[in-house]
Image (tube, rainbow, N blue to C red):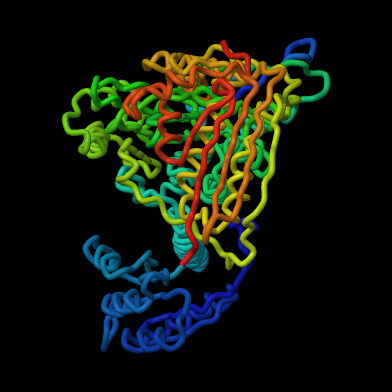
Amino acid sequence: MSDLAPPFEPLTVLIAEDSAADRLLLSGIVRRQGHAVLLAANGAEALELYRQARPHLVLMDALMPVMDGFDAARQIKQLAGETLVPIIFLTSLSENEGLARCLEAGGDDFLAKPYDQVVLAAKIKAMDRLRRLQATVLEQRDQIVRHHRYLLNEQRVAKAVFDKVAHSGCLSAPNIRYRQSPYALFNGDLLLAAFTPAGDMHVLLGDFTGHGLPAAVGAMPLAEVFYGMTAKGFGLAQILREMNAKLKRILPVDMFCCATLLSLSFQRRSAEVWNGGMPDGYLHDIASGERRPLKSRHLPLGVLSAQAFDDRTEVFPMALGDRVLLLTDGVIDTCDSAEQLFGVERLLQVFADNLEPGQLFEEIEQALRDFGGQARDDVSMLEISLVEPAQLTPPALVYSDSGQSSPLDWSLSFEFRAESLKRFDPLPYLLQLLLEVHGLRAQSAALHSVLAELYSNALEHGVLGLDSRLKRDVRGFARYYQLRNARLEQLQEGYLRVHVQVAPQGTGGCLVIEVEDSGHGFDVQRVMDRPLDLGRLSGRGVSLIRQLSRNASWSDDGRRARVEFSWEAQA
Amino acid sequence: MSVNTQVSEDGRKLTISIKGRFDFAKHQEFRDSFGQINKQLNSVVVDLKEATYLDSSALGMLLLLRDHAGGDESDVRLVNSSSDVRKILAISNFDKLFDIS
């Protein structure tokens, strides 16, 4: 439909004119054009007729008895509100001042006496066009307002649902601080944190491509995988593979999620990092003041096929009080009025000027304001510090079964060979099975930690033949994990066996775990003679095992480790 | 036009040139630009000489182009990228998917 030539719609035209002859003349002209006519002999009558009949257009004589045209025009305009009711003044006034008064009173046009039929028809048409335009604009404005209100409401509800999901994790833990613009979710930012069963912490900061609802849609499945697999004790590599495969499956080709995934181990004092497409994160070594960038080494999640996906992580040692800072590109891509970016250099300057680590967020925000950047709604920052495990209280695991079917007298053995060791992490499955034993549930965190240490010792020092002394300093630490990845990738043979035995004992029971590997073993006596010390970078695993389990012992030249867990009858 | 296309004389190479900010506002134009990809074409060049900035939806568009040009079998080259643009491509590790120069 073209707005320029609308189909003819007859109007109702109100004519206010005190001269009966002029009324007759005008109404004749207007009727011949096909419009309906209402007649008033003065301003008061005109106002009353307007109230009753709401005509589309008014022809108004300026000078009339009882109420003049100026007054009537003013009141009609007031009644009409936002609707445009064009008023054309009929006037013999010719001096400028009189004409100006017509416009001031709300008149839209004049028609000078004597009346010309052609001019009047043209003016009515022009005014009608204006009237329709105004009506369309108002209608569209109301529509936009309505849609906007719907949208805000939908966002509010979606956010409420999402907050429940996202914040079911441990973002409120005392060692985490974070800032997120209130509707960052609708700009694709995602922030998740959760405890692993062993008491480590997993954190994800993600940034979906695009804006609005499409960007928020991918967040749900990602959060589901993150929380589900973290709670079951899966490691970063497995979680990443699953997230990538899921996003690849459900997202259109041009959507993906940049993400940094972090696993912080408070017992081993280390951080494991995978960064795909996010700006550098920073590991702040408090003692030296150094900030090590955590660089993006991978394509974002949801780009590569499951076969091509690279789940390799980097591991860094940490000391008590060290912090990791993660941020989204909303920080460094904030633009000033000249479209200049805030950039990494300015961020590093904020770091350099920072004296009180607790004030860093405020200082970054202040720097963004000083920079004159337009406030963006996709600024997310997270800082997590390494603290003593005792300072954290991982939530108790919730079990739904009654415990009547708790298995109490059984054993089983697994053997994992090279191809399985490369890709598969059997621990979550093993632990799930062990936690069917009710008596063990109270010790689940210790059980997770010990089993994880036994497994990684057997794999890394045994099967892969890595020397833990490599981890004595920070550089060696990184080298160690590079070697680990490389050797695992090339692994052709070797095995790792796990024997588990559960037996009743008095009113409770006892679990014996033995882990055996195909490696060269180690000098058991030398390691046992070392003090139980967690301060070193190397050899923490063995100390941890000895502290958290009973009767830890090594035999067969260190190729076989044995630990016990026992429990008393349940109240 | 801020997205221009040119097909080589032998009809085997498509060059897409981007001018200004490469972001969501160019979505339709960019999609239209590679709508003409056909079996005869065996390579696509995206000329970023006059592109000032890339946002994440531009990266998404490049993935779409790559997919359209044959995915892992495709030959898509990003040329003449400025240092700012190259930084953005580097953070996302797009050099693992595209030949960037």
Judged left or right of residue A457, residue A244 is right
**Residue A432's spot in the image, x, y percent?**
60, 49
Q: Is residue A507 above or below residue A462?
A: below
Q: Residue at x 43, y 35 (%)?
A: A546
| Left or right: B53, with A8 as reference point | left
User: Dividing the picture into quarters, in which one does residue B72 lie?
Assistant: top right
**How many numbered discs?**
0
Determine the image quadrant of residue B27.
Answer: top right
Tell which residue pokes out farthest to the right in this image: B39
- Determine the residue positioned at 51% across, 82% down: A37
The residue at 46%/25% (across/down) is: A315
In the displayed structure, does residue A566 sit left or right of residue A253? left
Residue drawn at x 41%, y 84% as measured from the top left: A50
Q: Quadrant of residue A545?
A: top left
Q: Residue lying farthest left? A: A355
Q: Position of residue A346 (x, y in %)?
A: 28, 24
Of residues A484 and A503, the one drawn nearer to the viewer in this rendering: A503
- Residue A539: x and y in percent read 42, 24
Classify the position of the N terminus of chain A by image quarter.
bottom right
Q: Nearer the viewer, residue A77 or A113?
A: A77
Residue A348: % across, % down: 28, 23
| Up-down relation of residue A176 to residue A26 (above or below) | above
Residue in the foreground of this view, choosing between A103 and B81: B81
**Camera-side residue: A75 or A325?**
A325
Residue A275 visible in rendering: yes
Check the image and report above or below for B35 versus A55: above
- Judge whether residue A215 can be spotted in this image: no
